[in-house]
């Protein structure tokens, strides 16, 4: 069977052996849809390019499904969207695809390959192209360009005639997000029920995720800026309202979790969006992340009226007064961390009236400023085991100088224990029986797994 030129399969790898997925408590606690791939699929479909998605994270046993699709549909391209932790799993799957049809072109995108660019092509011969940054426009050009035109496509890494990797440079014009179609949620098998928001972070089902901006206006040392670089763009309030209305009309979605890095950065946009939600109610609630300096009482009050269930770590009293639940997003193990600094952080966090918190293990990702610093200074900063498969913020691959991995693991467990042993915390979770009954169903179903992670740091 000949390959179909106007067809691409988009794959979201799992990142570890599929038989471990059923016992992975972090996966059970949060299965987020690959919205980037869904956006690319919707964009390509506008140009009569068939784009299908196989999400191995939501559906772990997908190897046979991928094989069947490649054999039957014969797409000309297969695209992978990978994080650092899922990249090598993507390479494994790409190798299997090449064994079935050697002529299929393999293209990788996402934060990991955007950071490493030429190194990916030079080190992994199974990969034909790397898309750096946003994928919509570059993939469309790649799928429709003649062979002699591909070197002129911006934001692309490809092989020259000599076999060396060549980066074509960055496109000057960024995508206007309001011109993009809504993500192709229909391409995500089982949506919305196959996906789960973080447990105890939503009041009702069905629910979904949404990203209404790209990039970030800040420059944190631990954050990789390889995909959107130093830009920060966002959908207008009107586009955002109609996006939620679409999800409500088509899928009956009742709650949205905004995964934006800085949802409240543009105050006017939030005010306009909240105004639309109040003026023309969708009977939906939402939660988002925000920095403390972007919040004040009037804005919080407006967001509450619009249906916000905001979860952030600071200005807790102000947020609580607005009747909004508070979740802290924390990180442990940055360079310079000591037992004394961890104790200070623990004391401070415990002084806050947090309803919930998430503690990530610091990971120096390729492309972040701190990754380069650690690479240059080495043992002076700490011990870094650059094992990509373990770099998922769930394992200490970096241990600050003066500490050991066992000490970091101990501090991590103690941090969680200190929080969960407080009677007020458990009373708060009990109140979620009527605020988020679905969360309690999920908790009770895998209760021992959740407790084992909270008190012993055992993910599986």
Image: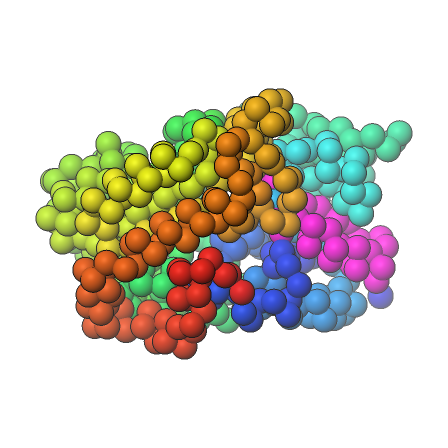
Q: Is residue 96 magenta?
A: yes
Pinpoint residue 100: horizontal percent, then vertical percent: 84, 62
Which residue is nearer to you in this view: 397 or 44?
Answer: 397
Q: Residue furthest right?
A: 162
319 displayed left or right of 442: left
86 displayed left or right of 241: right
Pinpoint residue 173: horizontal percent, then vertical percent: 52, 28
Q: Quadrant of residue 329?
A: top left
Tell me what residue is drawn at x 29 percent, y 54 percent: 419
Tell me what residue is drawn at x 79 percent, y 68 percent: 71
Q: Which residues are magenta?
A: 85-112
Determine whether 80 is above or below 432 in the image: above
Which residue is nearer to you in this view: 390 or 104?
Answer: 390
Please indicate, yes or no, whether residue 224 appears anywhere in the rendered image: no
Q: Is residue 118 magenta?
A: no
150 displayed left or right of 304: right
Please indicate, yes or no, whether residue 360 appears anywhere in the rendered image: yes
Pinpoint residue 186: horizontal percent, then vertical percent: 50, 65
Which residue is nearer to you in this view: 392 or 149?
Answer: 392
Q: How is the image coloured?
A: rainbow
Placement of the N terminus among the 4 image quadrants: bottom right
181 displayed left or right of 110: left
Determine whether 52 is above or below 337 in the image: below
Q: Quadrant of residue 135?
A: top right
Tell me what residue is drawn at x 39 percent, y 29 percent: 217
């Amino acid at each position: 069977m000949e390959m179909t030129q106007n067809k691409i399969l988009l794959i979201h790898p799992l990142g570890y052996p599929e038989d471990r997925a059923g016992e992975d408590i972090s996966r059970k606690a949060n299965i987020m849809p690959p919205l980037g791939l869904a956006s690319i699929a919707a964009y390509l479909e506008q140009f009569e390019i068939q784009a299908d998605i196989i999400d191995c994270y939501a559906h772990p046993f997908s190897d046979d499904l991928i094989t069947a699709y490649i054999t039957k549909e014969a797409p000309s391209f297969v695209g992978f969207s990978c994080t650092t932790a899922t990249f090598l799993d993507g390479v494994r799957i790409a190798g299997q695809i090449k064994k079935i049809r050697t002529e299929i072109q393999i293209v990788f995108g996402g934060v990991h390959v955007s950071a490493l660019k030429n190194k990916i092509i030079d080190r992994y011969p199974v990969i034909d192209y790397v898309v750096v940054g946003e994928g919509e426009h570059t993939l469309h050009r790649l799928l429709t360009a003649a062979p002699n035109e591909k070197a002129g496509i911006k934001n692309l890494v490809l092989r020259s005639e000599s076999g060396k990797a060549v980066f074509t440079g960055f496109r000057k014009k960024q995508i206007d997000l309001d011109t993009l179609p809504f993500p192709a949620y229909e391409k995500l098998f089982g949506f919305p029920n196959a996906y789960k928001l973080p447990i105890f972070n939503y009041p009702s089902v069905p629910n979904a995720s949404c990203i209404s901006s790209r990039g970030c206006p800040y420059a944190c040392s631990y954050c990789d800026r390889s995909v959107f670089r130093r830009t920060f763009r966002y959908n207008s309030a009107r586009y955002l309202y109609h996006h939620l209305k679409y999800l409500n009309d088509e899928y009956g979605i009742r709650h949205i979790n905004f995964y934006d890095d800085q949802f409240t950065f543009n105050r006017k946009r939030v005010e306009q969006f909240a105004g639309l939600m109040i003026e023309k109610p969708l009977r939906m609630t939402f939660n988002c992340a925000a920095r403390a300096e972007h919040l004040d009482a009037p804005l919080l009050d407006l967001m509450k009226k619009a249906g916000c269930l905001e979860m952030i770590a600071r200005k807790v009293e102000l947020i609580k007064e607005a009747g909004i639940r508070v979740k802290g997003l924390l990180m442990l193990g940055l360079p310079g961390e000591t037992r004394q600094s961890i104790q200070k952080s623990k004391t401070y966090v415990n002084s806050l009236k947090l309803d919930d918190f998430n503690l990530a293990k610091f990971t120096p990702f390729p492309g972040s400023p701190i990754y380069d610093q650690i690479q240059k200074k080495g043992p002076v900063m700490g011990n870094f085991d650059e094992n990509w498969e373990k770099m998922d913020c769930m394992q200490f691959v970096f241990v600050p100088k003066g500490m050991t991995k066992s000490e970091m693991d101990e501090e991590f467990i103690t941090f969680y224990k200190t929080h969960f042993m407080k009677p007020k915390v458990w009373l708060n979770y009990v109140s979620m029986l009527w605020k988020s009954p679905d969360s309690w169903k999920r908790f009770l179903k895998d209760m021992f797994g959740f407790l084992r992670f909270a008190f012993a740091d055992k993910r599986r």
